Image (spheres, rainbow, N blue to C red):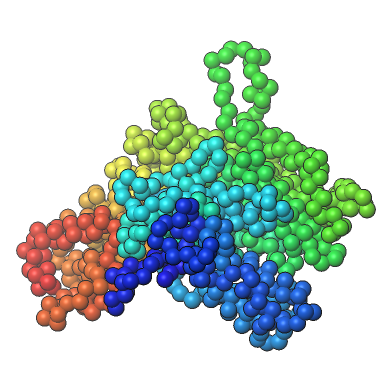
Amino acid sequence: MVGVKAINPTELGFGLDNFTALPLHYASQEPYTNNLLELGDMPYQVAFGFTEDEVRRLIATRVFPGPDKEAMVDIALNVARSWYDGYYVFKNYRIYNPWSVMNFIKSLTEGGACINEAEILTKAQPYWIDTGSTEILTDMYYKIIRINPSISRVLLRMGLDYFNLKDSIEPSESPRPSVRVELIDSFDEHTIQKATPYFDEQTKDITIKLATLEDQDSLIENPTLDKFMTMAYCYGYLTIIEGKYLAIPNWEVLTFWSQIITDETGSPDEPYLLRDFGRLTESLVSGDLSKFCDGLKRNFLDYLAKIDPGTSEYFYREILFMQVRLGIDPSQYDCHSEFSVDSGRANNCMIPKAKGSTGILLEIKRTRKGEIIDYDCSSSSSSSRDDDSMMDVTKLPYCHLKECLGEGIEQIEKNHHLQAFDGKCSRVLVVVPAFCGKKYLVCFKSYDYDGSKWVPSADQLSAKHKSCLLPPDATMSAGPASYIVGFTSPKSDHFGLLVSKASSVIPALISLFKEEELTVHDVVRSLVNLTTETSTLQYMQSEDTIRAVVQKITDPLCVVADLFCMLLSNMNKYEAIAVSLVQLEVPEVAQLASTSRALDQLTDVFVKGADKQYNKHAQFHFLASVFADLTMVPAGREYFLTKSKFDSKAHITKLIVFSEHKDLIRRGGVATAMKNVCFEKAYHSEILSEDGINMLPYILLPLCGPEEYDIDDMDGMPDEVQLLGDDKKRESDPTIRKTLVEALILLTTTLNGREFLRARK
């Protein structure tokens, strides 16, 4: 009856009841369940897609008929296998997506016959992905990533598994997938993983729970990582291998996953892990090594501005590996890739198909040396320390990275990794990036084939193939910031010590605001962590510090503006800082309203910054939390309820339009600000007036669903909440709903408010 998602008879609506549902994963388990109807040794699951023999026959009869076209049939089949195969049924038996295969074959027969692999590749498109909306999955993803960033890590790991299986030279030796699956009937409070997925430190496996009998509504409600993966599997975006591994089935589906974590129009807070993958690979292919280094640095700065990857030593390598691998053009290069979380090996071998082209070997290294330095301050004798402990702390990562680069080059030469290019090209460019914590260096070295072996190129010092190290020593000048950030986590054993030393630690960190962006990122992350302890906020209350933070936020070029918004949100918990911010004056900014008042500028940035219209690196959602805290003090409420001098509109009117924004942080902060200003009873008439602030529709709209009302019931309601469409969704967050209801209750504390609300029903 069904291939991927089990059908509930009650959902059909026409009384169909005598059937057996055959979800794909049942066929990949042993022993088989009793309700399976088997045809010989093969269950019916294989009927829900094309087998490889069927796809070959379709191509041979419809596209390339005749015995002389066998080579073209093989090429087309390889492309179809890469793009549309991979759905596992009946142990390890695989089927193809039939819709995509038929459209692929149709495209091959249109516009003239294809004569080579490059032309066939142009016909492969995501036909099935494009047939329907992916809104439900993308919405779930953007909600979950804010509470569980590890979702990106899981998707990234499955992408690595996909390439490990696809690119392996010897299929029999290909590594197994690393994302395990545990099948359950339904979710309950004991089975839902609310934080991070189970991570096995020994095998590096991740375990996900799938509840395949759960209905869609229960999966969407209060989404979690496990629920999201269940939905993705049931929709056909994942498959189960051997009944125990969760995997991406094919390249068509991989295009969806790469888009969902790179789509800048979806969730501004999402770390776009693979944003410039095409450009990075292109720079390697063209030999523009400086461009590769610049792109690498830019990507990491952008990524670090969103998430602290120090939680995983593998994250950097995983991102770079996928960035380069996704950008490889299969018509120009054959690729053999390997990513091993056990041995630490990560490489991409790009073997050119065209004569005279340069092969590329990307070998990604990591070292943990120097990430945490423990100095014995109690020792009075320096001679008792290790040599490394006597080195300048700012140079330690650089020295270890240089050593790691040397080991990488030596490993390539000693283990004959270049043999994969024998007979395929005459020159290979070796690229070795090495990572240590948040520091990295890149080394380039080229090799020529002399007819029997690979030797370093004679023109090694030429501009194109110059061996270089980036970033230079100068970027390490503020290195200690990268060390302290790991200790500032509230979960760290050293957090209490740093808080007790806040009077000296915080001013020292603030003094680094003018350093380069990578250092500033670490500085602000440290301050965000430390300021979660309210006792440290007294050391942030100077007017110069508040002004410096505001100016960083309003700088349209600041890469870490969102982190500064988070810092200001923490700072505002201290009433003295909130009061100072209300009155603070700062220099005018050309791109903002002509005003020197800090709050005017922050409000303008909040409005203009939505969807990256003001600063391509920031969304300013956490300014909503700043405004929510400001409205807790009388001066803040007074500011938002009075009219602006430069546009004669109440400042709160610039916020309330975001009460239904897709970002939880933004609309949650706005809802709290709306509630807080309702404590000012003297302004209730202005708050409710349709010619004034007119806040009521913005309170009600998030509370409204798709329900239909009689004409008599709607009479008198605000125009904005009448005749809402069937697709109208009620606010999903219970805390925000509660906040909005509390705002309505506050408005009933005055006679005018009660009468107005009664009239509006």
Q: Nearer the viewer, residue 691 or 570?
A: 570
Q: Nearer the viewer, residue 686 or 141?
A: 141
Q: Position of residue 432 (x, y in %)?
A: 72, 47
Q: Check the image and report above or below for 383 versus 151.
A: above
Q: Check the image and report above or below for 623 versus 384.
A: below
| Among the 4 quarters of the image, the one containing residue 601 | bottom left
Residue drawn at x 58%, y 44% as measured from the top left: 314
Say whether residue 147 is left or right of residue 114: left
Residue drawn at x 12%, y 77% as measured from the top left: 713
* Camera sees residue 507: no
**Quadrant containing the C terminus in the rendered view:** bottom left
Q: Position of residue 183 (x, y in %)?
A: 42, 52
**Quadrant containing the N terminus in the rendered view:** bottom left
Say whether residue 411 is left or right of residue 295: right
Q: Check the image and report above or below for 182 versus 25.
A: above
Say whether residue 744 is left or right of residue 727: left
Residue drawn at x 36%, y 44% as measured from the top left: 571
